[in-house]
Amino acid sequence: MSETTTHIPDEKVRIGAPSIPGFTEEGEDLSPINDNDSSPLGGASAKAHSHGGGVGVPDSSRAGRLTSTNVEDFAKLTGREEDWRFTPLKRLKGLHSEELIGAAPKVELTGNDIAKLSVVSADDALNGVAHTPDDRVSANAWKFASETQVLTIPKNAEGANASVRITGESLAPAAQHLIIVAEENSEATVILDHVGSAVLAQNVEFDVRANARLTVVSLQAWEDDAVHASSQQALVAQGASFKHIAVSFGGDLVRVNPSARFTGERAEIELYGLYFADAGQHLEHRLFVDHAVANCKSNVLYKGALQGKDAHTVWVGDVLIQKEAVGTDSYEANRNLVLTDGARADSVPNLEIETGLIDGAGHASTTGRFDDEHLFYLMARGIDEKTARRLVVRGFLNEIVQQIGDEALQERLTDTIEEELAATEN
Amino acid sequence: MSTLEIKDLHVSIETEQGEKEILKGVTLTINTDETHAIMGPNGSGKSTLASTIAGHPRYNVTSGSITLDGEDVLEMSVDERAKAGLFLAMQYPVEVPGVTMTNFLRTAKTAIDGEAPKLRTWTKDVKEAMSKLKIDADFAGRNVNEGFSGGEKKRVEILQLELFKPKFAILDETDSGLDVDALKIVSEGVNRAQEENNMGTLLITHYTRILRYIKPDFVHVFVDGRVAEQGGPELADRLEEEGYDRYLSVKA
């Protein structure tokens, strides 16, 4: 006679826990020892996710996505993929399918001289420390970027301020690779200011080392004809804090994918975004926060305004709380204000939770028009309709502007919002 | 002296079942320096009258008129009515996120007066008015009504009343949700505005409690969209004793 014994991990054995196959006290047991029969999410689907080059795990988890520096590993885009279904591929001007041999936009650094800019070759070992392409456009940019610009904030630096002006001067499809290294215990604000005209596939890496504090503002202030697809990935080490603010109001098609992964405990990630889409513009932001480690905190808030016919914004938020990430506190939200008819906001907040032992996790999305009650209240106090609308929109977007902290940039953004609002009224 | 005249007003709203008439011929005249109380059971149309005077888009005037010193109020937009001197203290003040109280108050004062108030005197006036209504000074930096309790919202409505100095104030159930202390403070604010600015007051309420602090010159009883009875302050005392049954049983 033979007996089979199953080793049950400690977390299942608790006083009062019901002994239902496939369930722990916290809910569905997603651990690998659950075979496929008892749970659709158990077994092979819950295997450790692959982040290196190689075959993707065939499941729907965001972390199971294929990553590779080889563009040939990625299938040609059809536009029906989950990751591309909102993006009009024709308007990508070949960033996904052509050779990106155009001249990359000029990179110029201004600021208080603490951060240093240098150039390394595209196969220098620095490349790929904090980034591996996870879609075809990013891999294409990886292949064709002829050099890599590296901005380094030295160890223990305080109050470093760097404005990196990226000026596009040609519409030939081009690739660019940037790395920003915030060394241990440094504190810096970096602005990536994208201006001019370009058709650009861009990879940006952020290596945020232990106890560093890095704030990045990626400003897409392009001319009306620019096309910009940017994969911006961050590694956030123990005790570090990373704040990323995407501000998009220029360009014909802009697609920014900021993602950040924790590699050490007690770290913090904040992803903020502000976008203002005019008629015909396509502004897309796809985020990913990977809680791979315990006791970390994340907060995501994107706010957008849309006006004009065929103004289109897309927001997809993915927050993954892995099994090891006990003590996580996270929240993601997207709020859209549609100012005129004919505009469309797509908003998809996703949350994957693999452990119940967390402090909090939430996701939210709202898309709406002007609240008539807000307008009535302000007008009933003598404020005319035009001014009332401005007050409400300004107030709505201000929450993100305030996060930036750099006064000059905040003023510039407030002016831009006023210009956009003046355009609505005409 | 100014006069607000409402003549045979019929007002309806859109519902899923079609247009529904709420006010079925309301006639009422109020002069500055007078206090009129409007009382009545739920659903009688009191708030509808208040919102209609202010111009809320939800309410359709199907016939009748509202004039302010002979000028047609119904022709005016919502903000024009406020500039003409009408102020509605709302029953449920909305939160307006992202717009600070100081910004809002100054913008409104500028709109109503036609010019920006002098900064130094304005700041002083706001501070004084806030302290008389026992509103904490740090409310100035908060967003309009955001996170305010019911009592705080109502006091902020009266703060606006004192700062904007309208000719006529329509107080839509300002007393609902207030404790005794808040009620006294709010009533003092209204009385102050009346004395200082010769304001005319249209006070809409369910309960006679507030009438102990704000003395009415006239009382109108609304039942089913019409004025069922009018009288002096003694009418309020009678309502306190008898309730509204007298009017409702007559209907049946």
Image (cartoon, coloured by chain):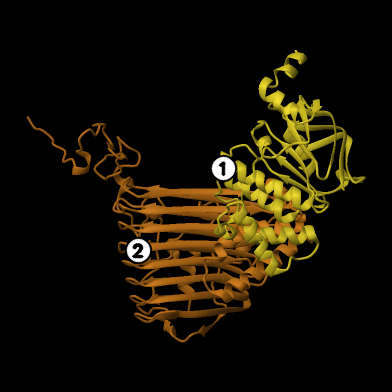
Q: Are marks 1 and 2 in contact (CB under 8 Å)?
A: no
Instruction: Look at discs 1 and 2 and give the one toward the viewer.
Output: 1
Quadrant location, the C terminus of chain A:
bottom right
Whether residue A303 is visible to the viewer of this picture, yes or no, is yes
The quarter of the picture where residue A214 lies is bottom left
Q: Which residue is mark 2?
A: A267
Q: Vertical placement of B138 versus A174: above or below?
A: above
Q: Is A355 on the left or on the right of A379, as rendered?
A: left
Q: Which residue is mark 1?
A: B181
- Residue under the point 37% across and 80% down: A124
Helix, strand or loop for disc 2: loop
Badge 1 and badge 2 in a common chain: no
Camera-side residue of A151 and B45: B45
Can you tell which chain is drawn orange?
A
Position of the N terminus of chain A by quadrant:
top left
The percent position of residue A65, horizontal first and vertical second, equals 41, 55
Q: Nearer the viewer, residue A155 or B43?
A: B43
Residue found at x 70% / y 57%: A307
Residue B17 image point, x, y percent: 74, 26
Identify whether A387 is placed above or below A25.
Answer: below
Per the rendering, the mark at residue A258 is: none
User: Which lettered chain is shown in yellow?
Assistant: B
